[in-house]
Amino acid sequence: MRLGIDLGTTRTVIARVDGGRYPIVSIDTGLGSAEWVPGACAERADGTRVHGWEALAADDAPALLRSVKRAISGLPADAIVEALPSRPTAAALLDEHVAHVLACVRRALSLANDAPISAMIAVPANATSRQRWLTLEAFRRAGVEVLGLVNEPTAAGIEYAHRHLGLDNKRSPKRYLVVYDLGGGTFDTSAISLKGRLFELLATEGIARLGGDDLDEAILALALERAGLDVRSFDAATHARLADAARAAKEALGPHSKNAMIDLAMALPDAAPIVVPAADVLRACEPLVDRTLAMIDSLLASLPAHGIDPEDARQLGAVYVVGGGAAFVGVLKALRAKLGRKVEIAPVPHAATAIGLAVAADEDAGIFVKEAVTRHFGVWREAQGGREKIFDPIFDKGAANVPVEDTSADSSGPIVAERRYRPRHTVGHLRFLECARRDVDGGPAGEITPWREILFPYDPALKDEGDLRDRTPQPLLGREEIREQYRYGADGSISVRIDNLTSGYGRTFELGRIE
């Protein structure tokens, strides 16, 4: 069975490959069916944890996470998730959630527990490499053959081209597509090149913690203010259910709606519904929507570097609106005011990414994906004899994967980089990080995520020592030549091979696999 799995912040949507068709998998909710699995996790009083629809139905659970992905966002694999009393690690909680999603899929498709599953998996374009690795490993540990890891906007672009242009669109004047992807917890906007069956990520911008959840919180704050209630007075489980009430009101709001009704009784049985004018809801959400529009401006400004004139409307296929949060009427109103008739919402916004992933997973579709580095990755190095630290950018945002000539779904080779130098000290202490942007001096800026720190023995006398943490670096007179070889994989993993070329020894470090 080949699937496309969009593991979203608040909803996971699955599409399957079925003889050139890509239907959405219908999931049993216990009371009916739905096209997604909620990203929720609840912990009952006895310490047992349940996920998805069962979590949302667990009225007796004192602890409720509305989103597992948001709860672990930015955490190392072995970090504790403090929001749950049992304090699981981030990796263990994600493993549980992925296993639950797959169990739902197997039941829906009547698959045996040992029936093989192959899948294309999506991640936000601006996800950190740590998030990419955690996602990849969770599916692998669940027994899934991961065909590839695709950025969510690229997958949505595949769905758009499959439905609109066919996959042999070489004669089309449309050179690119802008995807506006507002999910439950993240926002991405990306420019995707449209070249037949090759889908190339040209440029991307995004906000790691802005999505439909944040719109829900803005609407909830407005409703509670009208009700004279203080959001700080509720526990986490009640707050999560109140936010679900705000989400239901948001999704019910249409272009001609006069009012929005927030049913507080979903969490507070004795509370009356709160009716808020639709205009007030739009104003409450406007600052969040404006932040996404600023990202589109930044994205369009980067396109001339790719030979694209953003002022030439003939080159643009559409501004394609996808994601669970994108159907909010305030988003569409703001986008159309800014970009006009080119704005097009996906027929099924919450499932566009999953359908595109299923197309990419289909061997007969022959899709080739050429992704790009979506965050800067580099290392702090010593300069001026150790008196200063400088940032060395190993992989810059926008660097493209090297396409390879094959017909597999994974059609991108690794990006490689190399450094050579003669060190001044006996032990190298390399501190790796990634960041959303670089400042005017080239240093890391924006959202910064520290990576693993590694120690390497530049002095051959230390090459057999297992632990170098207690070694105080001593001067080394530049006799040794060191080579670092980096590989950035199509799945976002990064490894480095460090060799002492003079003395003939080296080590390989999988940078994303050990926190």
Image (cartoon, helix red, strand yellow):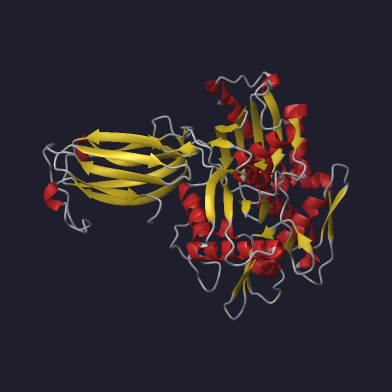
Judging depth in this view, the residue of 490 and 260 nearest the camera is 490
In the rendered image, residue 402, in percent from the top left (x then y), is placed at 45, 33
Question: Image point 64% across, 74% down: which residue?
Answer: 62
Judging depth in this view, the residue of 441 and 335 nearest the camera is 335
14 over 481 or under it: above or below: below
Judging depth in this view, the residue of 142 and 419 nearest the camera is 142
233 over 20 or under it: above or below: below
The quarter in which the N terminus is drawn is bottom right
From the viewer's perspective, tell me whether residue 72 is left or right of residue 355.
left
In the rendered image, residue 249, in percent from the top left (x then y), is placed at 80, 54
172 over 291 or under it: above or below: above
From the viewer's perspective, tell me whether residue 44 is left or right of residue 144.
right
In the rendered image, residue 159, in percent from the top left (x then y), is placed at 68, 39
The quarter in which the C terminus is drawn is bottom left
Question: Image point 53% across, 52% down: which residue?
Answer: 146
From the viewer's perspective, tell me whether residue 390 is left or right of residue 317.
left
Residue 325 can be seen, yes or no: no
